[in-house]
Structure formats: structure tokens, C-alpha cells
Image (tube, rainbow, N blue to C red):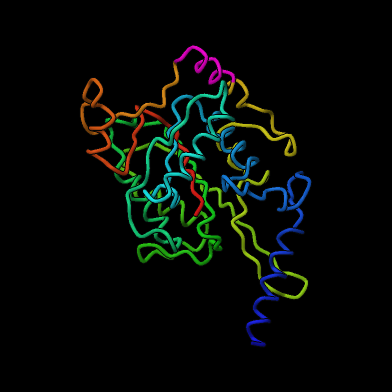
Amino acid sequence: PREANGQKHDTVDRLMSVIDRELGHGENGTYAKFVSDATSDLSDIFVSRLASLIAMAGTRCLTVLTSTWRHPDQRHRLKRLEDALSKHLPEHAPFAFGAFTPPGDDSSHPRGRLRAIGDFLAGLSSKCYPPTGMRILVLDDFFATAASTWLVDDLDAGSIEGAEEYLRSRLPQSKDFALKIVHTYDSWLTPNGLSVEVGAGLTMEHYCHAAEFLGGGCSFCGRPPAAAPKERAVAKAVKNKKVSFAMKSCDEKAPSGKGKAKATAKSRPWERSRSRSLPWVAKMDN
């Protein structure tokens, strides 16, 4: 009982530390501001920032979901996330994730998550993606673990750079691409010396790193908002009904008529592929 009480006390101390943890990079407040809605399990601030990155990436952006929310038993959560993103996109454009990583045992360890992303990259078809100009942005907390602990396919990644190199090695060598992992993770020690690790989400610091990769600006860093024209272009395209989130298979000639979506789902049940879309943003949580 005494040991159990001590563990409970440590848990409370860690939770209070998260609530009190001041945010950096010019963002006011603490992690308490990101508490998710009890009904949707979503933080509207994070959803808004993700939608901003998707818009920033442009009309050819493919969003790939590797989160456990891609699993069939989580469809209700996935639908809520897609609906929430739609509300924050220009002109409230209907949104659906363009693809899912293949099903597999990636729900408990960073190595599984990295391997799942790598498997998806290895399967990219030249029919879908041009040989040059691809940009790949990965957003993930990797189960709230430090990059120094990551190991995948007998490769000791050991760092963000090592993980990025692993993912690059999984892409077809003929591809010309840029790749960046934004590790949405934070860690610190409490005043009592307890270690705290959290999946931090899209704090302003993480958002800034992602936006920089996509050509966006940051008022805190002083970079000009280079992505603003792209966002206006997305809004204009949506208004003119030039942006489509309907999917078709890249590996097979898409059938015409009402059976199109059904045939695509049957051919690759884990993928809702988008036509010639890049760069892509991989949205990943738990």
C-alpha cells in the first residue's frame, strides 16, 4: 500500500508539472491550454495549427495518417478529426486523409511507427509522384519517447537525424526529395527530480519548425510569412472548386462511375490515395 501510494503521488506530481509547464518560443501559457475537448478528444488549437500546415503545403499536399486512429475501431475519432480540420481549412473545404500507412504492429513502440512510415515511403509509385521536388514532413511524438532511444531494423537511429536518414533510405533512390521529422515531444525534471516525458503536440515551437520546412513564416523568429500567398491560392482554388479530396488509386487505372471509391478501397484497403499530391504531411499522434 505504501508503494502504491507513492506511485500515485508521483503521478499527481507529474500531472501538475505538465499543467504548470511554461511554453516557449513566444507562446504564452502552459500545457493546460491544450487540454482536449471531452467529447471530441481533440485540442482545437492543435487542429487549427495542423490545418494551417496543410493549407501551407498547397493544393498538391497528400496527408498520410499513421496514428492508431487509422484502425477500424477508431473510425469515429478519425471522422471527428477530419470534420474538425475541414472547419479550419480555407472556405471550410471538405477534408479526408489521403492515405493510411499499412496495418501492422506499430501501436506501442517508435520502431514500429518508423517502420510503418518507411514501408509507406518504399511503396511510393513513380506513377503517382514525379521524380523531383518531393517534400516529406513527419509530425509525430513517437509515443512520447526521446529520439536517443529509437531503434529500427537493427539500426540505432539515436537522433532525429538518424531517423530521417533511415526514412530516406526507404525511398526509391531515383527520388529527389527533402524530408524532415518534427518530433512533437518535450521532457524535463520536476522540482522533486521526477522525469516527465510528454507528447507535446503542435506547440508554437513545433509549428514553427514545420512551417519553416514548408516555406512559412514565424512572427517570433522574425521570418517573413512566405507561405501566405500559398494559403491565398488554396482559398481561391477551393472557392473555384479546383481542390478535390476525392481519392483514386495510383497503381491501377481508376474505374469510372459509382464503383470508383469502392474499387479503390478493395484494391488497397489501407490507402485512400490522392492524385499526384506532394509534398505530403504525415499526421501522427498515438
User: Is residue 140 among the parts visible in the rendering?
Assistant: yes
Q: Is residue 155 above or below residue 248?
A: below
Residue that appears at 56% across and 19% down: 235
Q: Residue furthest top?
A: 240
Q: Quadrant of the N terminus?
A: bottom right
- Identify the residue at horizontal 42%, vertical 56% (top origin): 113
Instruction: Classify residue 26 by image quadrant.
Output: top right
Q: Does residue 15 lie above or below 283 as drawn?
A: below
Q: Residue furthest bottom?
A: 2
Q: Is residue 208 visible?
A: no
The residue at the point 50 percent across, 26 percent down is 58
Front in this rendered view, residue 286 or 138: 286
Q: Is residue 238 magenta?
A: yes
Look at the image and give the residue range highlighted in magenta.
232-241
Q: Position of residue 196 (x, y in %)?
A: 65, 67
Percent position (x, y) of residue 125?
28, 36
In the rendered view, would you say 233 is above or below 67?
above
